[in-house]
Amino acid sequence: MYYVLMLTNSQLPKWAYFVIATLLMVIGLEYVWFNFSLNSNHQELASTTASFKRQVVEFEARLASTTAEKDQIFSQLTEEQKETLSLKRKINRADDKIDELKKITETDPELLQKYSKVFFLSENYAPKKLVDIPEQYLYDNKKLQQFSEEAWRFLENMLKDAADSDAPLQIVSAYRSFGTQSILKSGYTTIYGSGANKFSADQGYSEHQLGVTVDLTTTGVAPTTLAFANTRAFLWLTNNAWRYGFVLSYPKGNSYYVYEPWHWRFVGRDLAEDLRAENKNFYDLDQRQLDTYLGKLFD
């Protein structure tokens, strides 16, 4: 204003006043337009900000809803996964049960029966299939010996591992038929009379007829003698035979026959391991207990 008054009081041409007035008017108009634009921008910014805030609120609401829905879906999925896993376990247990039942139906039930004066095998009984034992494992390689095909792999592994442990084993006798046992018992009876009953089974009562029993000895020891109990091979058997499913049928103090350290029967690794853990013998168990191991006999 000061400068305007000075210009008014100064001696200027009229056209200069006109120019100045025009400039002032333009400046004023620019100022008014600037304020209008500024206010308009403020209003637009405020409107945009409010709209953005509304969108943020809506987004947060949708996000919360989506999160809740996701959590619900995840919870449902977790429950379904649990149900699926539970169903799979039930199916697996059912499959295992079916497999076990199948094994039981396919496994000769006689193999875990308590013979030796308890059960009787008829003269018509014979193992499903027998294999010839290689001569390298025989005490007398001129005499054919046979063993159950299903149990042979367990016996062979035991013989190999015993040899590798410097405790070589030789098979004196394996499978014996009803007729062979009858001839053998008759011979013993002729020599020993009724005393033969203490160490020899009658035909039909011998574990050898099952095809899963062997009489063992080792190098330099006469077969079926108590001397075998004092050998490294017998000690190895005592500590390791259970690993291959074999147990000593007639230990000291049994109520069937005299102590026979050479007489070993295959009963499956599961049963042999349990007998060892419980410090029991095969004939200590009830037949119903023995039958529960039938499905695992050749596992």
Image: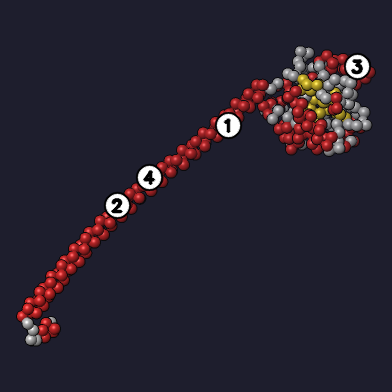
- Residue 187's disc number: 3
Amino acid bearing label 3: Gly
Could you tell me which residue is drawn at 74 percent across and 19 percent down? 129
Q: CA distance from mark 1 to mark 3?
A: 52 Å
Nearer to me, 89 or 275: 89
Residue annotated with mark 2: 58
The disc at residue 69 is: 4
Q: Are marks 1 and 4 in contact (CB under 8 Å)?
A: no
> Real-space Cα distance between discs 2 and 4?
16 Å
Instruction: Tell me the kind of residue under disc 2.
Output: Glu
Query: Measuring 78% from the left and 21% from the top, which residue is drawn there?
Result: 131
Quick check: can you spot residue 260? no
Q: Which mark is residue 85?
A: none
Disc 4 is placed on an element classified as helix
Q: CA distance from mark 4 to mark 3?
A: 88 Å
Badge 1 amino acid:
Arg
